[in-house]
Each structure stands twice: as C-alpha cells, then as structure tokens.
Amino acid sequence: MRVLIVHDSLSENPSKDELDTLDEVEQVAKALTSTGYLVSRCAFSLNLPLLKKQIEKIHPDVIFNLVETLNGSRWLHIATAFFEKLNIPFTGCGSRGMYLSSDKLLAKQLMKLALIPTPAWIENKKTDDISQLIGVPVIVKPIAEEASVGISDESVQTFKTEKALLNFLRKKGERLCFAEKYIEGREFNISVMMDTSGVKVLPVAEMQFLDYPKNKVHIAGYEAKWDEESFAYTHTVRKFDFLETDTHLIEQLKEISLRCWNLFSGKGYARIDFRVDKAGNPFVLEVNMNPCISSDSGFSAACAQSGLTYTAMIQNIVKGY
C-alpha cells in the first residue's frame, strides 16, 4: 500500500513547534516503512493545482494527514476538504469536524449550545458576557493557533474595568485573541481513538505543575511545551495514576470527551483538554481533532499507557481511515 504523508510547510525561520513537525514526519514514516508500507512525503501548499499534480503523480492509496497548522489552525479544513475533493482516503478527521473545531470561538459556541461546559469568554467585538470576566483572572488566547503559540504567563491577567479588558484585546495586533475565564485547578488531556471495535477513550492524563512558585500561573503554555531550558518545561509532568476518589471525575471527563467527539464529527483520533475547578467541575478548554502524534506527544503517551507501541498506534491510525 502506498501512503503519502502530507505535512506542514515550514516558514523561513521555523520555530521549535514547527521543527517538531519534521521529527513527527520522520517518526511516522519510520513506523509505516517498518511494517511494509511504501511511504512518500509532500508538504501541503495553498497552490492547490500544483499540489494536485504532485499527489496524482505519487498516486497514493491513502494520505496520512499531518497538516496541523495552516496560517494557524483556522484554515486546517482546507487541507481535508482538498483531500475529499481528490477522493483519496486520508487519516484523521474530515473537513466538517476540522472546520467546526479549529476556529476556537466557533467551537466554544457549539459546545455551549450542546451544554458541554466550557469557560466563559468574550472576543473583542462581542461584549455580552464581559461583566463576569471583570475582577477575576482571565487568560487571553489566540483564536486560531495550535501548540500553545501565543500563550505565556503574561496571558493570565485580571482586569478591573471592561474598558481595560477590551483595550488589551484590541491591542494584540494581527493575532486575533479572545479572553476566557481562567479556571484555577487541575488540567487534564483526554485522548480518543477509533479502532476496529469502535471509539475508545484512552487512559486519562493529568498535567501536574510541580513545585511552581506561588506567583507563577499553572498553565501548559508555549514555554512548558517547547523551551527545554525553562522551569516550566522541566516542572510540568504528565501522570496517569489516580486515587479512587477521582473515579467519578475521570468518568465525567471520558463522557464529556465522547460528547465532544460526536459534536465535532470525530474520526481517527483526537485530544480534548480540560481544566477542573476547585469544586470539581470540569470545563473543556479545547477540542483538537488533529493533535500532534510525535513519539513524545501526549496522545502517544496515552496510547503507550493503554499498551500500544508507537508503531502499533500508527498502524491503527492508517488502517482506520
């Protein structure tokens, strides 16, 4: 079987999260080749006629979709819609689910309508709910970025007036942002994957912020994910073991994750990120229908915890298109 890995194009001066894409492509290619697949690679381009010629020349049986950013996340559905137009099977979520989940504000609106708990938020043009975000910590996030791009300790702030909050959002420049209520508490990542028996929620992971100073916010920002020399990187760890007192919460997280999967037309694999407040109430931060699957990713760690090797995970994904 011929598998074509279609992946992100790199910028002229790629950042650490971009360079990670190259490692991911190498790892996926190695896993596929080791199990007998004929593997080719191609960077995704918005020059669709040229890309069409490249893909048709290779004539793949299936496309392994590793397009995880396209001018941020807001246009990721273009890649999957293009694959659908070519009528070539591909791994992961389809264009509908990708479109609905990649625009974070649209995703939050849909979750709210579906009664899936997500933190209160506002964008710089809509102010209906702004009063509940004044005088409490909020986190300011880019509307359409992945890999925690644009999120740092300075993203968490408290604003005393509505004007101050709106001015801050409007001064963020070209990167459109929104403000979301900051949930003090625990953080969880839930991985979901299809296999021959159906949809499975993989072992639940909690991100722990070890020995953080009192004045340092507990977030998995860009520094914690990519800056290997930083305190946040070395003191943010993943754990899979829980006390019996967490059993009900874990079941809640799994149930909500499956609701998110269904809401966004899940296919292949996904990751859902949660915060749980001090009263034990879970809130969905983000639904990622095309998460990173490099060997050191959270998704791969959850698969390993369930007994799947990395190669078996990749095989499972490519067979489940």
Image (cartoon, grey):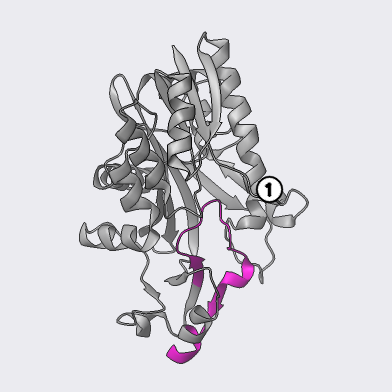
Instruction: Please provide the residue range marked out in magenta.
Output: 139-165
Left or right for 68, reference 254: right
Quadrant assignment for the N terminus? top left
Q: Is residue 224 left or right of residue 309?
A: right
Dot 1: element: helix
Q: Amino acid at mark 1?
A: Lys
Percent coordinates x, y for residue 292 in the rendering: 52, 39
- Residue 126 within the magenta-colored segment of the rendering: no
Q: Residues within 10 Å of mark 1 (few under 14, many from 20)?
A: few
Q: Residue 240, can we see it?
A: no
**Residue 141: in magenta span:** yes
At 34% from the left edge and 62% from the top edge, which residue is drawn? Answer: 118
Residue 51 placed where, x, y %? 47, 35
Vertical placement of 99 versus 94: above or below? below
Side of 33 relative to 81 (left or right): right
> Residue at the spot x=33%, y=41% of the render?
81
Query: Between residues 179 and 59, which one lies in front from this camera angle?
Result: 59
Image quadrant in which you'd find residue 268: top left
List x then y, in percent, for residue 182.
47, 69
Image position of 69 with respect to 7: above or below: below
Horizontal and vertical percent for residue 50? 48, 36
* Residue wearing tag 1: 16
